Amino acid sequence: MYEHVKRLAAVSFYSAPSDRRITPVQIPEHTELVELITGGRVFFEQDGTEAVFGRGAMFWHEPGEWTVHRTPEEDPYRCAVFKFEVDLPCRPAGRVTVWKQPEAAVEFGAEMLAAFHEQRYDRQALTAYVYAALAWRALNAGPVVKALYPKPLRRILQYMEEHYTEMLSAEVLAAAGGVSRPYLFALFREHLHSSPHRWLLRKRLNRARLLLAGGEEPVKFIAAECGFESLEVFYRQFRQNVGIPPAEYRRRYRPYPVS
């Protein structure tokens, strides 16, 4: 799938100094360099907006681009660095993504650093695994880096993440972000190309799919656990958005058939 990748040339760890400026490095030809932040903070400009990124942020650089290099003195960044030799650069996703589970970035970086330098693993297999694992994280990050959202929107999304099983009205969400109801909808249109209702519905349906595929709870319990106001609403929304009824989804994706 990633035939352009020739080898994993290096895995290293970098701790930014707090007492002097960092000199950025320009990525050479036939190279893709991934910086995975495992601690501290780094400043980076994306789409004309400067944002602060922390643990779990991943910067995927291609030839001609520069490594990250701006960090606050009180909290300098640390990162695992993966250098791939490639035929032609083919970044799998955006240049900046954020792992959904930032704590996993630390564990992954340490594990791959040890594996690379122990030199007892098949280099071809290690290259394929590391590149695919990083690409998977990049492809499955949020559609837009959360650090680039305005602060009110970040507060609203965090509130939705923690309270998605509750009956969340537009007024409740606006209050969580400290904004007016019209501005709430404007934020979602501009940055997420969605409405609060559609965003919340997607979150609930994603959770419902996981529960249907991974357990045997009655469908009515799953509907309630995911925040749907009634079983009828859950069935209607699930079929409209997923294409099949919940029971059929469970039958299709359960790990073992039931006799």
Image: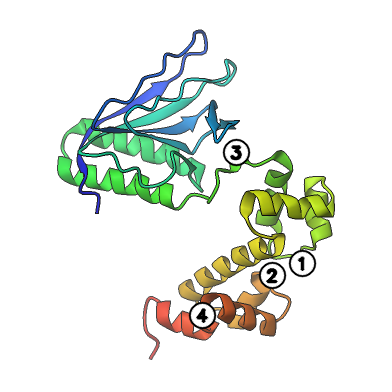
Q: Which element is circle 1 on? A: loop
Badge 2 density bin: few <14, some 14–19, many ≥20, Cα 10 Å: many
Query: Mark on residue 167?
Result: 1
Image coords of residue 202 (percent x, y)? 60, 65
Residue 151 drawn above or below residue 165: above
The answer to whether the residue labelled 1 contacts the one labelled 2, judged by CB atoms less than 8 Å apart, is yes
Q: Nearer the viewer, residue 113 or 129?
A: 129
Of the numbered discs 1 and 2, the one sitting upstream in the chain is 1
- Mark 1 or mark 4, which is nearer the start of the sequence? 1
Q: Earlier in the sequence, mark 4 or mark 2?
A: 2
Quick one: 244 or 226, which is closer to the camera? 244
Residue at numbered disc 4: 243
Can you name the residue that lies furthest to the bottom here? 259
Q: Secondary structure at mark 4?
A: loop
Q: What is the CA distance from the residue labelled 4 to the residue labelled 2?
A: 20 Å
Q: Quadrant of residue 169?
A: bottom right
What residue appears at the point 29 percent right and 43 percent down from the top-left corner? 130
- Mark 1 touches mark 3? (CB < 8 Å): no
Picture residue at 42% right of the left edge, 51% below the top: 139
> What is the x, y in percent for residue 113?
30, 33
Name the residue type under label 2: Gly
Q: Earlier in the sequence, mark 1 or mark 3?
A: 3
Give the Cα distance between marks 2 and 3: 27 Å
Q: Is residue 167 above or below residue 64?
A: below
Residue position for label 2: 227
Q: The C terminus is located in which quarter?
A: bottom left
Left or right, 36 with respect to 116, comes to right
* Mark 3 and mark 4: Cα distance apart in space: 33 Å
